[in-house]
Amino acid sequence: MGCRLWEESPLTTQLGQTQVQVIDSTGTASFAKLLYVSPKQINYLLPAGMASGLAQVSVLDNGTTVASGIVQVQPSAPGIISANSNGQGVATGYVQNVAQDGTAGPPQFVAAYDEALGQYVAAPISFTSGYNLVLVLFGTGFDNATASNTTVTVGSTTVTIDYIGPQSQYPGEDQINVELPNSLAGLGEVAVQVTVNGIAANPVSITFQ
């Protein structure tokens, strides 16, 4: 799953004594903005303007390299967030009924937590007569994505994209809004596939009643 850069993020490139340095395929070195640091995990955003190709990532503790590895950088690396945080199954997102005058009703989430199962399951989507239904999904790695170079299929239906780009609230998170035609009603569980610049994201699912 790719990372989108957040140019106006207040995030720092150092937490405690920890830094993450990235050297791209041209040899340009920069420090990544850090989202989270613990003894076993570091979440970071790739620096802006990185060249495509193999990049070396190094974790620094007080300026000393303690771990390193290689990542593949490409212009787009779309990934869709799933409700159970494993990249599979029911999506994280919601639907909204939009009236002809553009006013939108309250969001209806496409997943609900099942206490007995201890995980999120599908919350079936229904259509309301006289309203357009818009699906909002969240992901990352949508850099260079536009409605013209992105396709979204819901089941076997290619749907219209209203928006694709930064989510504008959480660093590194992207958003895509698509219109759901009434022909999807009653189909049950279907796969949602997002493809950006020919690169397919992980499929997720939603359910229609």
Image (cartoon, rainbow, N blue to C red):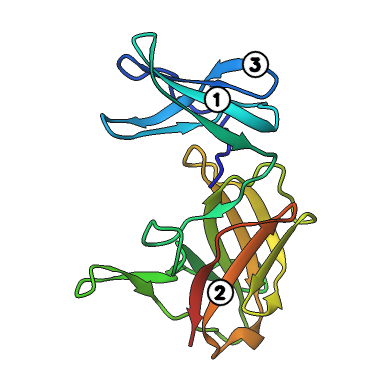
Q: Badges 3 and 2: C-beta atoms under 8 Å apart? A: no
Question: Which quarter of the figure has residue 137?
Answer: bottom right
Image mark for residue 174: none
| Cα–Cα span, label 3 and label 2 | 40 Å
Residue at the far right in the pictured view = 148
Which residue is tagged 2?
A: 191
Question: Which residue corresponds to mark 1?
Answer: 56
Q: Pointer 3: what residue?
A: 28
Tell me which residue sits at (28%, 34%) in the image: 40
Q: CA distance from mark 2 to mark 1?
A: 35 Å
Q: Which x, y percent locates residue 66? A: 36, 18
Q: Counting other residues with Cα less than 10 Å from the Cα at mark 3, is it few (<14), some (14-19), or many (20 or more)?
A: few
Residue at (54%, 42%) from the top-left corner? Answer: 168
Q: Amino acid at mark 2?
A: Ala
Instruction: Choose between 2 and 102: the one closer to the eye.
Output: 2
139 over 65 or under it: above or below: below
Question: In the image, what residue type sits under mark 3?
Answer: Thr
Residue at horizontal 67 percent and vertical 44 percent from the top: 76
Quarter assignment of residue 127: bottom right
